[in-house]
């Protein structure tokens, strides 16, 4: 890959990659870099292959998934690939009547708000997502020493889409259920934890070298509510895949006040958005975990010198960390100039090469 040429080293397998070493808090030849949403609308080659194919349909086609997952690896020389899919794919696979609407996001026709609705969420089996197993088999062959990250939505974030029926700013129906019927809420999150764990297991058994749990919307919760109503389900997911020994990454947005509790959920790596500097984030998360992050994705719209200055700030805050994976604080924004991303990968590699 591009990275091996840059460092003159030839990792033999994903296990020896800078990305997995950083996740395991081992010494690295350079700080590894990948971007959340690195595959997607910022890339013209993505827009081209997606033409005429709906989002969920493309997630079920191993040939398209393989091509789209590889695009940012080829173009940017990132240190890891992330499996192209969406957090709602396992829900679709068990028969939830949902779609991904362009420019909107996931929309659920009949939201889950009662005990009878909950009964519609059945177990996920590997056969439900045979296309995932097939695509990951194709991908690991193509990727060689570049690791593949599998992922899933965390129980709270999935529950928000299911209970609201679509994207939500205030999560009002979700919180009404959480505060109003704690027993049903706990059962819903437990059910989602089982589905999520089953989906991550499929990806790991097919060859994913790491997994990330997207707890994207938990920043909407106060720490006490997160601890009482969400932490048990997220912990259940991490526990369920612990025995595989692959690094588990836990990411959320607006989690400054939650970082300590996120550390307790059991991940090996905690993702941090741009609101908390990484040195302060490390104090909040506690010892024994690597951190991932945390350049503001909007910084990439500034001139090159400003991007480099802000990147230097992230790297300076990360200098004393026990394991750092460079990433943005949230996903790549769709109108980002892809060349700015390629330059950023090169810049981080150069600045951190030992
Ligand atoms: O990171 C990657 O490159 C892998 C691909 C990926 C997608 N969705 C593809 C996608 C990942 C990791 C996700 C996760 C996801 N999906 C999350 C958690 C990550 C986060 O941003 O916090 C969430 C909350 C979703 C739900 C979702 N799906 C949203 C909010 C949207 C955007 C709606 C829009 O059109 O703006 C989607 C659709 C989606 N998922 C797209 C992509 C590339 C855009 C659809 C398209 O390209 O047509």
Image (cartoon, helix red, strand yellow):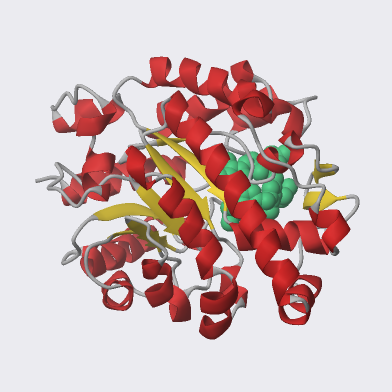
Residue 107 picture location, percent across and down:
82, 51
What quarter of the picture does the N terminus occupy? top left
- Decide: is 46 above or below 245: above
Residue 81 picture location, percent across and down:
43, 34
Residue 62 picture location, percent across and down:
61, 19
* Residue in the picture at 84% in, 51% down: 108
Residue 89 picture location, percent across and down:
68, 39
- Decide: is 255 above or below 23: below
Horizontally, residue 282 falls left or right of residue 201, namely left
Q: Nearer the viewer, residue 216 or 266?
A: 266
Horizontally, residue 226 falls left or right of residue 124, namely left
What is the count of numbered marks?
0
* Residue in the picture at 46% in, 40% down: 339
Q: Could you tell me if residue 297 is visible in this image?
A: no
* Residue in the picture at 13% in, 27% down: 8
Looking at the rendering, which quadrant does residue 317 occupy? bottom left
Q: Could you tell me if residue 240 is visible in this image?
A: yes
Horizontally, residue 47 falls left or right of residue 332, namely right
- Decide: is 314 above or below 14: below
- Decide: is 215 above or below 131: below
Q: Nearer the viewer, residue 29 or 303?
A: 29
Q: Nearer the viewer, residue 215 or 79?
A: 215
């Amino acid at each position: 890959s591009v990275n091996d040429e840059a460092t003159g080293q030839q990792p033999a397998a994903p296990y020896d990659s800078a990305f997995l070493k950083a996740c395991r808090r081992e010494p690295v030849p350079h700080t590894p870099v990948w971007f959340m949403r690195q595959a997607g609308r910022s890339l013209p080659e993505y827009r081209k292959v997606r033409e005429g194919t709906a989002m969920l349909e493309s997630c079920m086609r191993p040939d398209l998934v393989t091509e789209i997952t590889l695009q940012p690896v080829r173009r940017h020389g990132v240190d890891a690939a992330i499996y192209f899919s969406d957090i709602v794919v396992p829900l679709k696979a068990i028969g939830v009547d949902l779609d991904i609407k362009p420019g909107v996001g996931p929309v659920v026709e009949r939201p889950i708000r009662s005990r009878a609705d909950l009964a519609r969420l059945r177990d996920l089996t590997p056969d439900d997502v045979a296309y995932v197993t097939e695509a990951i088999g194709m991908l690991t062959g193509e990727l060689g020493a570049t690791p593949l990250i599998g992922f899933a939505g965390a129980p709270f974030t999935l529950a928000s889409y299911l209970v609201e029926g679509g994207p939500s700013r205030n999560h009002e129906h979700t919180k009404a259920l959480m505060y109003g019927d704690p027993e049903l809420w706990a059962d819903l999150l437990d059910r989602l934890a089982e589905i999520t764990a089953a989906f991550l297991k499929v990806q790991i058994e097919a060859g994913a070298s790491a997994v990330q749990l997207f707890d994207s919307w938990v920043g909407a919760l106060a720490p006490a509510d997160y601890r009482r109503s969400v932490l048990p389900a997220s912990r259940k997911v991490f526990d369920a895949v612990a025995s595989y020994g692959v690094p588990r990454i836990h990411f959320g947005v607006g989690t400054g006040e939650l970082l300590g509790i996120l550390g307790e959920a059991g991940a090996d790596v905690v993702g941090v958005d741009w609101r908390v500097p990484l040195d302060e984030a490390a104090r909040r998360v506690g010892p024994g975990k690597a951190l991932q992050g945390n350049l503001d994705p909007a910084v990439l719209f500034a001139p090159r010198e400003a991007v480099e200055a802000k990147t230097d700030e992230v790297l300076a805050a990360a200098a004393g960390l026990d394991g750092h994976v460079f990433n943005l604080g949230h996903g790549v924004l769709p109108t980002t100039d892809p060349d700015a991303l390629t330059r950023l990968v090169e810049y981080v590699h150069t600045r951190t090469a030992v």
